Image: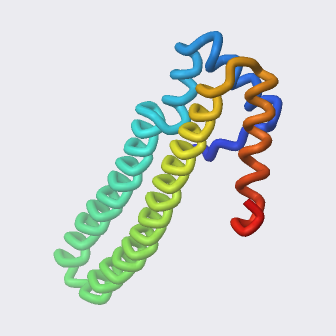
Amino acid sequence: MVFKVSFSPKETEQLFLTYLRNPRNYAEIKKRLFGEIAMIEFRKNLRGRLYFMATLTGIAVVSSFFSIFAEHWGSFGAIWIIWAGFMIGLGVALYMAYKDDFLVLKSNEAWFQGFETIAHRSKTLEDFIIDWNLRKDIAEKPKEEI
């Protein structure tokens, strides 16, 4: 599962201190939220959904053989109509989940790039807090005021 980054101000300050004092832990946090680990989870989730769709297709094929051998053509048609409905629904859900998870990963990446830009410029926690708050103020102001 992919999670959207939403740190509280206190957590952001702690992340900055981790960035300065313990780069290995910071890299691990970053990997979990948008790096390699997040991409592995993203692919695993996608693969699981595809396996589920393949399993439903297999069940429909096996059920179809029973209908063919029993010569129940109405059942045969119903199985494939139900299968088509499930595949359309699952396909739409799969596309929406893929799109949402991909956008969350890109959003997390942008957040960390902004964080690292400000953290790299700041030498102390106080400097970081000031720069971080100014970044939010600039982003919230209309362009005419800046």
The residue positioned 29% from the left and 85% from the top of the image is 77
Q: Residue furthest left?
A: 69
What residue is at 73 percent from the left and 59 percent from the top? 146
Name the residue located 77 percent from the left edge and 64 percent from the top edge.
145
- Residue at the spot x=74%, y=38% of the render? 132
The one of 58 and 14 positioned closer to us in this rendering:
14
Answer left or right for 10 relative to 59.
right
Q: Is residue 1 visible?
A: no
Residue 20 lies, in percent from the top left, at 64, 15
- Nearer to me, 94 or 13: 13
Residue 83 in sight from this viewpoint:
yes
Instruction: Check the picture and name the quadrant holding the N terminus.
Output: top right
Colour logic = rainbow
In this rendered view, identify the residue nearer to me: 23 or 86: 23
Q: Quadrant of residue 65?
A: bottom left
Number of numbered discs visible in the structure rendering: 0
Residue sticking out furthest to the top: 21
**Where residue 115 sits: x, y (%)?**
62, 36
**Residue 79, how many percent across, how many down?**
33, 78
- Residue 124 vs 100, above or below: the answer is above
Q: Residue 51 placed where, x, y %?
A: 33, 52
Q: Quadrant of residue 60?
A: bottom left
Q: Is residue 139 above or below residue 111?
A: below
Position of 85 with respect to 8 (left or right) is left
The residue lying toward the viewer, choosing from 103 and 40, is 103
Residue, far bottom: 74
Q: Is residue 124 left or right of residue 111?
A: right
